[in-house]
Image (cartoon, rainbow, N blue to C red):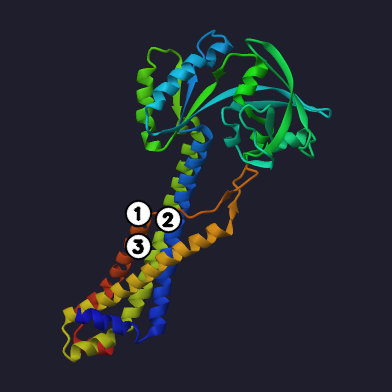
Amino acid sequence: MFLFKIGWDNLWYNKKRTLLIILLIIVTTMAMILYNGYIQYTKEGMALGFIESSGNFQITKEFLGMAEPEDVLISEEEIEEIKNILSSVNDVKSVECVLEFSGIIGNEYTSEIFWGEAVDNPEKKSKVIDGVPVFSGENKIVIGSLLAEKLNIDAIEDQYLNILSSSAENGISLSSFELAGITTTGIPQNDKGLLIAARDVIIDFLGIENSASVIKVFLNDDAEKHTIMNMLKNDLQDSTGFVLRDWVELNPNYAQINTMNATQYLIISGILSVLVFIALMQALISAFNERLREFGTMEAIGFKKKDVIVLMLSETFWLALIGIVIGVVCSYGFALIVRSSHIEIIPPGYSEGYKLIFYLTVKDIVKNSLFIFFTCICATIYPMISVMKKDVTRLLKND
């Protein structure tokens, strides 16, 4: 402990050199932690976005052979059966029935093709940027922003749109719906024809029985999805034609983007680690080599070589500890500033961006901190060898 106390005091004999080394450690710590935080955020944020859109898994009916279109819909009895099975599972947060339909939408100016989703809770479906959302039972619709532009809609008030669609049971259906709001998904290709409505209203409009094209299941814990899916498959084995797909299978671009990000991460983190290693090694080795005369003087007044080595390690320990602790604190501070600044990143092909957040995890912080700490320790090895090999005279001459 005495040598550690001397090591601490030695740091402040040359404050400028000590502060510059600590600053270097702070910067390298922040660079590695924040880069890992950004990569983790892109992965976790993308997963949460896909789950919010498609559910943890979906249930559909398989189109087999020459089956009629209405046979692909999930009937009311089947919906109730599935809901009854899932109601006994604690990890199930909600079950959303979706009826997909399409057709032509128009007003006095023009008409366009649309693809619609009629859901049980349309107010939760998407972000309304103008107007108000649609609620269950309302004879209203929400459309995509680019579809609104195509229809020359300037104001939402007192806007009514005519919808022409068809079903196998009732043929062609035509009705007028009040425009409640305009939404955006951030994907222009989707916003060109998106229409959202209440499922009970669209069922009446199409004149069909209570049914759904897709059942989306949302869970409290995504890790349980395969267990619940297997349980549901076993309970539905007497019912034919059901297909269960999790959100990863429904969004194949997630795996592709993750693979690309993982490759970039390996390359960039590898380069960053090498740069950090070289920079810290160079700074600490140079600092200790400049002090060889000081170490020779210490030996001359009675210090043993092992005491000098312990002293060098203690100084390195304090430098690394101070730099890493401040670096971690600054990383959290920087992440908090960025979060509160509402900085957005707009990916290619999207009309809207997502908020930039650094997702800092304890695992990544510990991993990066240990790497920097052991790099600092490794930087002490060469000066230690010089102290061990040289006698007092050579150390005093710095030869």
Amino acid of disc 1? Lys
Q: Which mark is residue 369?
A: 3
Q: Which mark is residue 23?
A: none
* Outermost residue toward the front in this view: 137
Q: Quadrant of residue 398?
A: bottom left
Q: Measured along the vertical axis of the image, is residue 243 above or below residue 160? A: above
Q: Is residue 84 visible?
A: yes
Residue at 83% across, 27% down: 108
Q: Measured along the vertical axis of the image, is residue 27 above or below residue 83? A: below
Q: Measured along the vertical axis of the image, is residue 87 above or below residue 72? A: below
Q: Quadrant of residue 92?
A: top left
Q: Is residue 193 visible?
A: no
Which residue has dot 2 on it?
360
Q: Which quarter of the rendered picture does the C terminus lie within?
A: bottom left
Mark whose residue sits in front, 3 or 2: 2
Residue at 24% across, 76% down: 384
Does residue 184 appear left or right of residue 159 in this picture?
Answer: left
Q: How far apart are the alpha carbons under marks 3 and 2?
A: 13 Å
Amino acid of disc 3? Ser
Q: Secondary structure at mark 2?
A: loop
Which residue has dot 1 on it?
363
